[in-house]
Amino acid sequence: MTLNTKKYDLLLKGGTVLDPAQGIHDRRDIAFKDGLVAAIEPRLDPASAATAVDVTGKLVTPGFVDLHGHFYHGATGSAVHADEACLSAGVTTGVDAGSAGFMNFEAMRDYVFPAHRTRLLSFLHIGAGGLVLNRILGGDLHDLRTIDVDRAADTIKKNSSMVFGVKVRMHVDAVAHWNAPTAMRLARAAADQSRSRLMVHVSGTPIPLPQVLEFMGKGDIATHAFNGNLENILDNNGKLRPEVLAARKRGVIMDVGHAGIHCDVEVVKSALKQGFAPDTISTDIHIGPPDRIIYKLNDLVSKFHALGLTLKDAVAASTVRPAQVLGLQDSLGSLAPGMSGDAAVFDLREGRFVWHDMAGHNVDGKVRLDTYLTVRAGSVAWREGQLTRMGEC
């Protein structure tokens, strides 16, 4: 057994740090110790670290925070293996968006999440069983008897360090239009009772979008906000609907929740022209049908940069902004000393890159972020196509 007597455990040397939370976009060395960021300086001595990695010419960001994914691996038929899907994209924190309800949350908490190196958080599905039968029934709120406001709220309160609110799917396949207002009301009640947030799937809603937004307030999340279905954020003239602008003004978060099928390039372009950029960029990563294109977060940051966001804004929407939405900005989303030791290192590939959506639209770009290395809790968790071991016995 050897003792580490070095000042730092890990040093990333020579990279260009882009940390929107600190307003840094410049060459910096970053050191980690005991799972946290220990120092960020123009120059640090590589001899001061047990391990030093030269990342000269590469982009270094805080670890990405994916606000919407599905990580109840092995339980729903559509959830991904978090480490394989997240760490390979520079994502160090993944938020499960309602894969489990109050009846099966503890199994996800106790057996699935601890098996991963990725930090995993969640929103609780308003339905008792979450998405377990979604692939069989085609929806998850066909019977509103699966909703128990008290038990859902109690589950959130008892697990408040990792459960940040209630998820409800307003989709024509998930809930009948005659039940949708009741489902929204009950989800709102559970969020209020647990003093937490409400995340609403707004793509393909069976009731008008303005009616859904009426239930939402400051800190709530409209995920799939840039979908191209009939009830989207634009009116018939392609202008932002007044109810959407009012929702943002009162603090509703407009989240991408891409999923391939829930983000329409033309809607995004129109919104950006009107000064309406997404608050957060998330993937809704899951195992989809064979013909569905589902991108990881490094690709979506690249795609939204190609659509017109500055690289700083695209990175902010994947780091500090989702951290703020969760109320975790004091520990996540930045590389300031004392923050969680989570970082992503990317090669900025130049060339012609094309991203697609399921409506048949393409986005052409000249730059893509390809993950070179991911640091989780102060140690290398993924490097050039390979997961590293969680630890040694």
Image (spheres, rainbow, N blue to C red):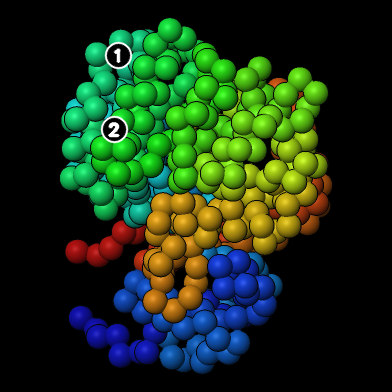
Can residue 32 be spotted in the picture? Answer: no
Q: Position of residue 221 (x, y in %)?
A: 48, 39
State which tag comes first along the sequence, 1 or 2. 1
> CA–CA distance between discs 1 and 2?
14 Å
- The residue labelled by disc 1 is 144
Q: Is residue 325 visible?
A: yes
Front in this rendered view, residue 240 or 272: 240
Across and down, in percent, residue 201 comes to 49, 28
Give the number of marks.
Answer: 2
Under circle 2, the secondary element is helix
Describe the element under mark 1 as helix, strand or loop.
Answer: helix
Q: Which residue is mark 2?
A: 190
Classify residue 154 by image quadrant: top left
Q: Position of residue 350 (x, y in %)?
A: 78, 56
Please give the name of the residue rendered at 66% of the width and 17% of the height, measured from the top-left corner.
230
> Could you tell me which residue is drawn at 26 percent across and 41 percent down?
194
Residue depicted at x 40% and y 23%: 184
Give the x, y percent position of residue 314. Answer: 65, 54
> Compared to 51, does 261 lie above or below?
above
The local crowd at label 1, few if under 14, some if 14 to 19, many if 20 or more residues have their Cα within 10 Å, is some
On screen, 69 above or below 206? Answer: below
143 w.r.t. 87: above or below: above
In the rendered structure, which amino acid carries the disc numbered 2? Ala
Disc number at residue 70? none
* Residue type pointed to by label 1: Leu
